[in-house]
Amino acid sequence: MEISFKEFQELDLRVGIVLKAEAVEGSRNLIRMDIDFGNEKRQCVAGLKQYYNPEGRR
């Protein structure tokens, strides 16, 4: 998939520090994360379980 440069300029990309990550109970793929973006903290959910194990066991 390609996007135009104009569409790329409209993206809102941010870098943050993951403060806490935990598996979502009952889900095979989801991880719930508390993220600090510097000026605000947010809770995010992402389907990253196949790439990252928040419990540190694998």
Image (cartoon, rainbow, N blue to C red):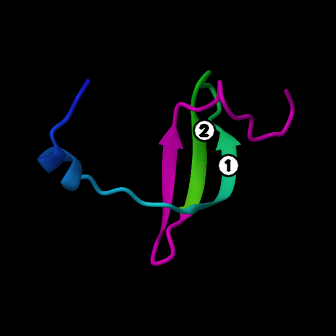
Left or right, 12 with respect to 4, comes to right
In the foreground, 33 or 10: 10
| Residue 55 vertical placement versus 1 (above, below) | below
Residue at position x 51%, y 75% in the image? 38
Q: Nearer the viewer, residue 47 or 17?
A: 17
* 4 w.r.t. 18: above or below: above
Q: Residue 12: x, y in percent?
A: 30, 57
Q: Residue at x 46, y 73 (%)?
A: 40
In this figure, which residue is indicated by the disc labeled 2? 31
Q: Are marks 2 and 1 in contact (CB under 8 Å)?
A: yes
**Stretch in magenta:** 36-58
Q: Is residue 41 left or right of residue 33?
A: left
Count the marks.
2
Q: Looking at numbered disc 1 in the image, what kind of residue is underneath it? A: Ala
- Mark closest to the chain's N terminus, 2 or 1: 1
Quadrant hosting residue 2: top left
Residue 46: % across, % down: 51, 38
Please, what is the three-letter code of the amino acid marked with disc 2?
Answer: Ile
Mark 1 lies on residue? 21
